[in-house]
Image (tube, rainbow, N blue to C red):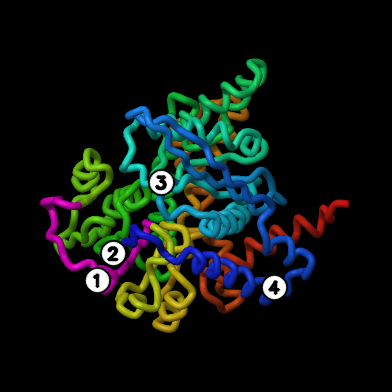
Amino acid sequence: MIDTKTPNKQSMYDTVMSQFNKTADIIDLNPNIRKILGITNNEIIVHFPVKMDNGNVEVFTGYRVQHNNALGPYKGGLRYHDTVDIDAAKALAMWMTWKTSLAGLPFGGAKGGIKIDPRKFSDSELERITRRFTYALGENIGPEHDIPAPDVNTNPQTMAWIVDTYMSTISSSERSHNQHVVTGKPVGAGGLEGRDRATGFGVYLSIKLLLQTQGLALHNKTFIVQGYGNVGYWASHFLTKDGAKLIAVQDAHATLYNENGIDAEALSQHCEPRKGSIAGFEGAREIDAENFFGLDCDIVIPAALGNQITAENAYKIKATIIAEGANGPTDKDGEQILLENGKIIIPDIFCNSGGVIGSYFEWLQNRNGEMWQLEEVMEKIEKKITQNFHKIHSEVLKQQTDWRTAAFILAISRVETAYKQRGIFP
């Protein structure tokens, strides 16, 4: 079951550093560049007071870690979760650097958030918390410097509050061309049509493309999803639409199973008024959480938090494909077991990159003062993901290695090239 307490965040940071060091050794990364990429550029911690509905003042802690901006402005999500801390933000920021590099985007990597359980606060309290956090970050974010986006427990409304607050802190002459300070905004507030489904669509497309390399189709393939938020829902939506069958879903509150298939749309409607909880859904029966990963299926989609697939449960997995909808859902020991058992892991830095690709198009749309339609947006996202898939597949075949290693080789090599060509100041 999804750990809603405190996963070992140091372990998550160890995981990303292990991946980095392994790749650096493989490509014989320039030792000076290795020193730079092995650390973060900036680690920002802010403490800020907010008045609650009852009149009391609470002090919150927020984080923003900027890992590297050699390829462009920092880019990465903001999450509201009680497991947010500096080590988690550092790991996630580094993954974002590799994700944007692999996707061929003009962005670097950042991540952040606030250490809270948003379910304990009213909407008006969350608005005040968000606005005060934005004010506390000040000039640490900006449309050409660091561009946040939604992540765990944040959404388009959160981004709209950030935009409005940020706009109030700059001069009136600058407001017309600073809308792209965040992405993932509501469409009416400068957002991109299709950004809401971009991450889940990318998960779906990466699975479909992988199956095609094996001469297979999605029709009648069975899959299970851990986490039924934005990513889990949209991935399920597109997969079931293409003939696959959703047979199990797990979140922090329940584990549901139906061998005949779970209606993705009905489950989403069930979750809406319950702040995302799948508990009590009548279209499936509850099973023991410990049995989730061991279910007989073709595809597993971990789309919740980090460190969910470990040495304690990886050996149970019968599925042949693990598509990482979440960031860092598989730890080092878990991955080793999966690879030894012949499983294919579609790595997070590619599998869930549809979101940051969609964010790039939103940023571009705002920057150019344009408005794109849903069909052309999805076309652009599909084209970009497909191109990136074939690059990784070629590297897998060339290096005779696993998909994560191939993806990391491409991502880190691109950043290394940027440093070699630009030099290091002074």
Per the rendered image, the range of residues in magenta is: 279-304
Residue 120, percent across and down? 31, 42
What x and y, as percent, mark residue 138? 62, 33
Does the stretch in magenta take in 23? Answer: no
Q: Who comes first in sequence, dot 4 or dot 1?
A: 4
Q: Which residue is mark 2?
A: 1
Residue 147 at x, y = what percent? 58, 39
Disc assigned to residue 27: 4
Label 3: which residue?
A: 116
Name the residue type under label 4. Answer: Ile
Q: In the drawing, what numbered circle is on residue 290? A: 1
User: Which secondary structure type mostly characterizes the magenta part of the structure?
Assistant: loop
* Res. 387 visible in picture: no
Q: CA distance from mark 4 to mark 3?
A: 40 Å
Mark 4 or 1: the one toward you: 1
Q: Secondary structure at mark 4?
A: helix
- Identify the residue shown where x is 40% and y is 61%: 6
- Residue 399 on image: x %, y %: 61, 76
Discs 2/3, front? 3
Decide which of tag 2 and tag 3 comes sooner along the chain: 2
SS at mark 1 in the image: helix
Q: Indicate left or right for 250 with 378 as reference.
A: left
The answer to whether marks 2 and 1 mark residues whose Cβ atoms lie closer than 8 Å is yes
Tell me the CA gap for discs 2 and 1: 7 Å
In 3D space, how far apart are the residues under numbered discs 2 and 4 (Cα atoms)?
Answer: 37 Å
Of callouts 2 and 1, the N-terminal one: 2
Q: Quadrant of the N terminus?
A: bottom left
Task: For marks 1 and 3, give the one nearer the viewer.
Answer: 3
